[in-house]
């Protein structure tokens, strides 16, 4: 009887293990809710800040007259392998950037289009219709936790959504808790946390829709991962107990 009870206990443990190791579909499938009635009017608005690195290019038919900033149409196709720090201009601690010919320009708090318009106005002292292109080079985000490829990612564009950021990291991993994702964002008033539930489409609107420079995306592990970490040891233990029960059963039958 004792051996029979042990065997029954092993079976119960095995079934419990199977039950806890399974993840309900509702915790895996993305965007389950119908967001047809969600009126998402949020827009991406990136502002330049202290420490940002930008490029400022002046397109002209006579680039040699503006060394360091002038670019002709032909030279625009040349690949520049220098780092962002080497080929860009850094906004200093006073919020200004020092550019050739026009000197200091206050850019802190401006959007990229606003910075372009301001710099264009200042270059009109040298050209009738200057063509200025401003780009932000220091747009980076960190994606960590339960993703396929955690790391620091540089964004080649001036806008990226949360879903695009997760795609850069190879999507969430098998043991990710899709209902427990956070965006840690630095603001003028300090650090804030934005909770995300990927299974609910309505959570991907507003502040969570886009990633901003220096955002940290953290994907928490699910309880299934904690269980899997002990599953190997428990599996070995269960196998040993099961083997002993079978041996004991065979032994009793021969009596």
Image (spheres, helix red, strand yellow):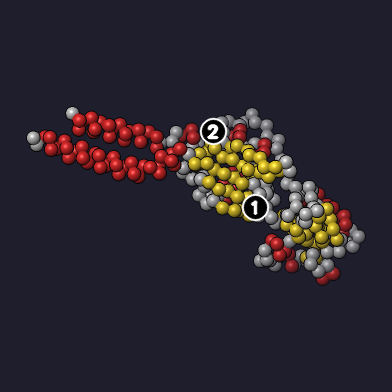
Q: Nearer the viewer, mark 1 or mark 2?
A: 1
81 vs 40: above or below:
below
Residues under labels 1 and 2: Cα distance? 30 Å
In the image, farthest residue toward the left = 255
Residue 125: % across, % down: 91, 60
In the image, farthest residue toward the bottom = 64
| Mark 1 element type | strand
Picture quadrant where residue 203 is located: top right
Residue where numbered disc 2 is placed: 32
Quarter of the image with the N terminus is top left
- Comes first in the chain, label 1 or label 2: 2
At x 55%, y 48%, the residue is 144
85 vs 193: above or below:
below
Residue where numbered disc 1 is placed: 140
| Mark 2 element type | loop
Residue 137: % across, % down: 70, 56
At x 49%, y 41%, the residue is 221
Mark carried by residue 218: none
Left or right, 130 with respect to 51, comes to right
Residue 246: % across, % down: 19, 38
Left or right, 138 with respect to 16, comes to right
At x 40%, y 42%, the residue is 228
180 vs 125: above or below:
above
- Of 206 and 186, nearer the camera is 186
At x 56%, y 53%, the residue is 151
Left or right, 73 with respect to 65, comes to left
- Of 188 and 33, nearer the camera is 188
121 vs 23: above or below:
below
Whether residue 67 is visible to the viewer of this picture, yes or no, is yes
Quarter of the image with the C terminus is top left
- Of 30 and 143, nearer the camera is 143
């Amino acid at each position: 009887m004792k051996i029979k009870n042990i065997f029954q206990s092993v079976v119960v443990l095995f079934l419990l293990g199977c039950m806890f190791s399974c993840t309900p579909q509702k915790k895996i499938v993305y965007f389950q809710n119908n967001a047809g009635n969600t009126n998402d009017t949020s827009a991406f608005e990136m502002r330049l800040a202290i420490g940002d690195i930008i490029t400022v290019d002046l397109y002209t038919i006579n680039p040699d007259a503006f060394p360091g900033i002038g670019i002709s149409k032909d030279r625009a196709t040349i690949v520049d392998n220098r780092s962002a720090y080497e080929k860009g201009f850094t906004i200093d601690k006073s919020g200004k950037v020092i550019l050739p010919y026009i000197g200091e320009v206050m850019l802190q708090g401006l959007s990229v289009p606003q910075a372009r318009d301001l710099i264009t106005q200042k270059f009109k002292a040298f050209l009738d219709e200057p063509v200025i292109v401003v780009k932000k080079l220091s747009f980076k985000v960190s994606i960590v936790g339960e993703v396929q490829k955690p790391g620091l990612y540089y964004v080649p564009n001036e806008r990226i959504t949360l879903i695009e950021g997760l795609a850069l990291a190879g999507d969430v991993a098998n043991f990710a808790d899709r209902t427990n994702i956070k965006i840690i964002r630095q603001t003028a008033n300090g650090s804030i946390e934005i909770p995300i539930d990927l299974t609910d489409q309505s959570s991907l609107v507003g502040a969570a829709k886009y990633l901003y420079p220096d955002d940290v995306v953290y994907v928490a592990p699910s309880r299934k991962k904690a269980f899997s970490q002990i599953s190997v040891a428990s599996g070995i233990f269960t196998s040993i107990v099961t083997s002993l029960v079978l041996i004991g059963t065979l032994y009793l039958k021969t009596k």
